[in-house]
Amino acid sequence: MKKVLFLSIIFIVGILANLKAQDEETQMLRGKIVDSQSKTPLIGVNVIIVGTEPLKGGSTDNEGIFRIKNTPLGRNLIKISSVGYKEITLSNIVVTAGKQTVLDIEMEEQITLGNEIVVTAARSKTSIEKGMVSVSGKTFDIEDTRRFSGSRNDPSRMVANFAGVVGNSDARNDIIIRGNAPTGLLWRFEGIDIPNPSHFGALGATGGPVTMLNNNLLARSSFLTGAFPANYGNAIAGVFDLQLRTGNNEKREYTGQVGFNGVELGAEGAFSKTSKASYLVNYRYSMLGLLQKIGLNFGTGTNTPKYQDLSFKLDFPTEKAGRFTVFGMGGTSGIINKPDSSGTKDFYSNSSENTTYDTQMGVLGLGHTYYLNNFSFLKTTVAISGNAVQSATDSVANKLLIAKYRSNSSQDKISFHTALTNKLNASQTLVIGVMADRLGVNYSDSALVSKNYFKKLREFEGSTYLLRAYGNWQWKVMDKLVINTGAYIQHFGLNKTTSFEPRLGLRFSPSQNHTFSFGIGRHSQLQDLAIYFNNLKNDNGYARPNENLGFTMSNQAVFGYETFVSKNTKLKAEAYYQALSDVPVQTQSSAYSVLNEGANFESPTVTNLVNKGSGKNYGVELTIERNFINNYYFLGTLSLYESTYKGSDGVERNTAFNGNYVGNILAGREFKVSKRGTFAIDFKVTATGGKRYTPFDIEKSLKEKKVYYTDDINGAKMKDYMRADLKILFRLNRKKVMEEWFLDLQNITGRANIYSQKLDPVAKTLVYSTQQGFYPTFNYRIQF
């Protein structure tokens, strides 16, 4: 309780020190409005702030830009309307004193039949808002990653509140989508597929303990959980499509932040007073060492993780040559894990080993958007990205230092992506794209397998390529019916395998309050690149028998229904079925399947794999959501699912990620405590099925003094996981400055959720390791 008291004192003192009387301020609200398909600026669009007296508003100029001076501070309800376009209501626009609010808005052209008029309702986070997504799509913005309790300003942890998504553990931000392994997720950043954007992330993984993504820089982004359109590929579970916002090109602004993720400094503004070009940059450095000193335990025992990262975007609009952007993100992390006898919780260390673990990740890209005419544009992006891991493990048993494992491996990629979008008419849009990746690898992994013998698990340096192309066609038969069709093809140069994948999506709205949706398609994914280069010892040295592995294939179908049960509350249901084929399994009869990999710090070293396994995932999902209107919101989700697989032995088993259910209840309310102060409280409860495990063969283990398992692979479950979080926030607007404090109390009941179990056959004990207990975090942010 001492650490809670310490953080509470900081929280309260910081607030009271700033509560001085001052007149209420206003701020500039501005933005740009374009056509959702052609991206052409829209002229004469009306923008009003609902509830202001007198009514405040404005309209767009020849460049699609609007400005509303003296916008009230706090949350505002914005209505946007234009003849021939669907009206938009934005219910959650936060305006603060320290920073101008700049909106980028896309409007959808309306298809009318005769005198029919279509009125649209307010949009929600669980709705599909743009592009050619028909089902299983969500959008989120900066406020979502900040608002939900327990998210730690991390987009991965935030989306774990959506239906069909489960966080793998308290120790990492891997996400499990509809029973799929975390490796089935695709990360896309500014139009380019990128490596795992997590500190301490393994090669081939998609998550880690701490995110490298900075939510202060993110624009509205998308998260897809199945049957996604043809512009996304090389993924079988889901897509995280992230966009960086553009820096303010009229005013220089600064952000400072201190919290769980580190100490941050950010800046944005115009390069000069006469230029429309802008910059946006943010640097972050870890402060976990300081948090340890005040008594906080974040799962590493007495060992201190260190990391830093940098993100930026430079924007250069021109009059005739289009718009150029330069963007990047990169970071380094490292930790030395040593045995800890203090009893402090440690998810990562072994009581008999010393481990050093260092990672690096980076991406640097150049984007160009060129408008061919008022109906077509070409967007091209080139980038270089990569990640690397250096790891060493030594045994310290019996006070002897013995080398057990060494790794010094890296992956790099040169990427090209160009897409032509052509709005054929008000009802039809065609998108054609091409992607090419040069994939470079440098693997050096070895492990001690017997006394004085180190086996080379991987030892390879070289490159290959991945070529892809896609086409999407959207046909709005009428405003009530939208058809999205497309096809995707990819070719892997290493073993000359090719996959062709048709996609189809429908959305039908027979009335304003009811929408039916359907999506079906074929999807494929490469294996973790390291798997292709696993070594097998033979008489001639080493062979690589996995090099001929093809893609894992996935056929998916999703049915959805949405209805507004009240003006601001929506009910959504989806049912899905996913059939997996060509899954890598071992040539000899075994229970192994790649579908169970992807939630740890190592790449699998299994050899003699063939594409003969299978799997299936199916379930139903329910969501009820109230938009943030009248100072409160709520979100409830429930998912019931099954996830099974077959290895080369032909036996159907539970996958490692088959928790069977997950439910979330989130709610929050804001209170105006003064003209310039806002107090908010957010609450979350999560319940999921327990983690799958293979039971010990207790009788045999005790008899032979060695650990043995039964043949019931993934047949047992830990106790169900439950956690309740509470977040308290205070936001203060001073003259040209915004300050924000929050205290996030995670697992407020202190429930001991089981993380793992260990059998000691000599001591005849079964020891359980638990996940994170009661864990308070704090955050302070200032903008000016």
Image (cartoon, rainbow, N blue to C red):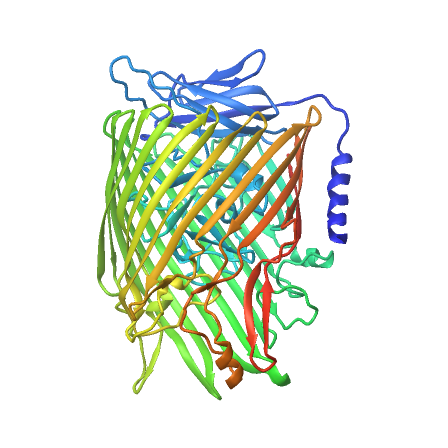
Residue 403 to residue 639: above or below:
below
Tell me what residue is drawn at x 77 percent, y 40 percent: 13
Which residue of the protein is positioned furthest toward the top in this rendering?
54
Which residue of the protein is positioned furthest toward the front in this rendering?
699
Q: Residue 350, how many percent across, how many down?
A: 58, 72
Instruction: Give 38 or 644, whichever is nearer the viewer.
Output: 644
Residue 378 to residue 524: above or below:
above
Res. 492 in view: yes
Q: The C terminus appears in which quarter of the rendering?
A: top right
Q: Residue 435, how many percent across, how many down?
A: 29, 49
Tell me what residue is drawn at x 77 percent, y 53 percent: 2
Tell me what residue is drawn at x 48 percent, y 31 percent: 275
Residue 703 relative to residue 670: left or right: left
Residue 172 to residue 701: above or below:
above
Residue 611 relative to residue 720: left or right: left
Residue 153 relative to residue 34: left or right: right
Q: Report which quarter residue 453 is drawn in.
A: bottom left
Res. 186 in view: no
Residue 592 relative to residue 114: left or right: right
Q: Residue 196, how many percent across, how many down?
A: 45, 56
Residue 607 to residue 71: above or below:
below
Q: Residue 215, how many percent across, how many down?
A: 53, 43
